[in-house]
Image: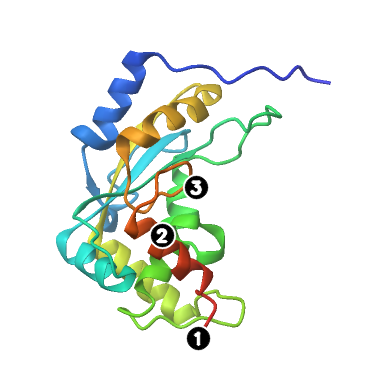
Amino acid sequence: MAKVEAPRVSSPRTVQTAYAALCDSPTLFDSSDWPEVFEGLAKSGLYSWWVDTAGARQLSEGIDARVKKGCLYFGQAGGTLWPNGNASHHTLLSRIEGDQLNGITSRSAFRRSLAAALKSPLALKTDKQGNLLDASETKLTAWMHEHLSLAVFQVTNRDEITNLESQLRPLVNAQLSSFAMPKSKVRVNLAQLREDFAVA
């Protein structure tokens, strides 16, 4: 049986560098240009989604709480799964392109949050299981291409990613991220919308 080791702890310098790349002074790429503007993203790392002014206005309408232009969601791809030490099969490319940007609501917490928030503003339709119908999936994807941009930070050592994500989460303070985050009106209202998502 393989030995299970503890997560690698990120250095303060790594945390600072990642924060700058993802939040403080990110290089943002329009999601409509994905993945052509990125190179070598079949690797592990962290990412942050950003929303423009018009998109923030629609999210605010749907959530009934103010969403600001800026960092919307923060996550990781490919980090070692603790405490069992199993390797994740995800990469930045598969997580962002396959699950979020061009995926379906059942495979992505971020995409499901967007769908719940935008169900009314975009008149999205769901089946009895709370999954978007094909036409609504297409509509949501088009909205993401129009209003969202993305920053990424590659992390070579997969054992480090979970720890780095946990250190960065409160610093990034992404508006729609909820795990291990303090309550806000946006997060509370969005949680209720996600619960009600299957209701037509």
The percent position of residue 39, horizontal first and vertical second, equals 34, 37
**Does residue 79 lie above or below 38 as drawn?**
above
Q: Residue at x 46, y 23 (%)?
A: 156
- Give the crowd class for mark 1: few <14, some 14-19, many >=20 residues within 10 Å: few
Up-down: is 16 above or below 23? above
Q: CA distance from mark 2 to mark 3?
A: 29 Å
For disc 1, the marked residue is 200
Q: Which residue is mark 3?
A: 94
Depth order, front residue of 107/94: 107
Amino acid marked by disc 3: Ser
Using the image, determine if residue 74 lies above or below residue 158.
below
The amino acid type of the residue labelled 1 equals Ala
Of marks 3 and 1, which one's residue comes earlier in the chain?
3
Instruction: Identify the residue at image location x=25%, y=67%.
Output: 60
The Cα atoms of the two marked residues, 3 and 1, are separated by: 30 Å
Q: Mark 2 — residue?
A: 188
Looking at the rendered image, the disc whose residue lies closer to the viewer, 2 or 3, is 2
Between tags 3 and 1, which lies in front? 1
Instruction: State if disc 1 and disc 3 touch (CB < 8 Å).
Output: no
N-term mark: 1 or 2: 2
Residue type, numbered disc 2: Val
Task: Count every numbered label the image shows and give the total.
Answer: 3
Q: Where is residue 64? Give x, y as percent.
A: 29, 70
Label 2 CA crowd tier, 10 Å (few <14, some 14–19, many 20+): some
Could you tell me which quadrant the N terminus lies in?
Answer: top right
